Image (tube, helix red, strand yellow):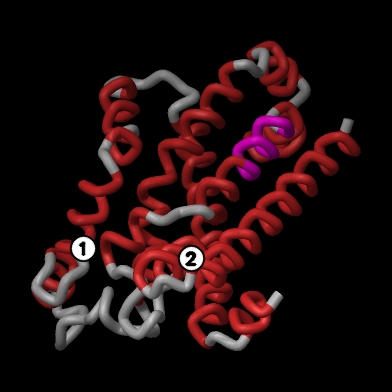
Amino acid sequence: MDNYRELFKLPAFKKAIRNTIIFTAFSILFQFGIGFMLALIFNRDFPGDRYLRGLLLIPWFLPLIVSANAFKFFFSEQGIINAFLLSNNLITDPINWLTNPNLVIWTLTVINIWIGIPFNYVLLHTGLKEIPVELYEAASVDGAKGWHKLIYITVPMLKYVIITVLMLGFVYTIKHFDIVWIATQGGPANSSHLLSTLSYQLAFREYLFGMGSAVANIMVVIILAIVFGFALFKVESN
């Protein structure tokens, strides 16, 4: 219990809680939203769709260490992002995307969104393929428009797929470690720590194994609570 008491007094822990909420919430929101939009687009056959689907999966196929190092270069002061913004007169000075304490967690969230979109797209696209085409044809005969089909056919038929995608997305995101550690190692000044990276920092860098384990235990409780909530919602929706 002393470990937990000391942990809640630690400023880095409070930042890690805040960062984990931001990182998880916005990652899931945009990964799911963009993935769902892409799944709807590619649910129809059009010229070149197979090649574009292959390109969409690239972030998923790349090892995380490759993606993290690539984005670490892209978002550096002399990186591609600043070069593009400067060349188009959108900014006057380079932005410290990964060294500004106020920006770093948002930059890492953008990186994670890009990496997680293919996962959401694949599962949602697979679910869309299981919806009978006859339902849409019957709705068209009855005069239903595109939004009506989406709200009254697509979403209800994908209900369980959506719940599963959101639940898995939450679990994968809240325990995320690689991107943050490779890009910033929780810096600058502990401003980009997540619960996962803080646990590692305390246990294996500062050798405070009890406090590191306490952070890990808190993560387990949060994950179990959210997963139980998703499962309960799924049962009630039956």
Q: What x and y, as percent, mark residue 190? A: 39, 80
Disc 2, SS = helix
Determine whether, in the image, residue 230 is placed left or right of residue 48: right
148 over 179 or under it: above or below: above
- Camera-near label (2 vs 1) is 2
Disc 1, SS = helix
Instruction: Examine the residues drawn in magenta and state their main secondary structure.
Output: helix
Disc number for residue 199: 2
Is 226 magenta? The answer is no
Q: What x and y, as percent, mark residue 110? A: 38, 61
Residue pictured at 47% horizontal, 35% vertical: 121
Q: Is residue 149 visible?
A: no
Determine whether, in the image, residue 202 is placed left or right of residue 236: left
Q: Quadrant of residue 176?
A: bottom left
Label 1 neighbourhood size at 10 Å, few (<14), some (14-19), many (20+)? many
167 over 68 or under it: above or below: above
Magenta residues, as a range? 159-167
Q: What x and y, as percent, mark residue 97? A: 27, 75
At label 2, the amino acid type is Ser
Q: Is residue 208 visible?
A: yes
Disc number for residue 72: 1
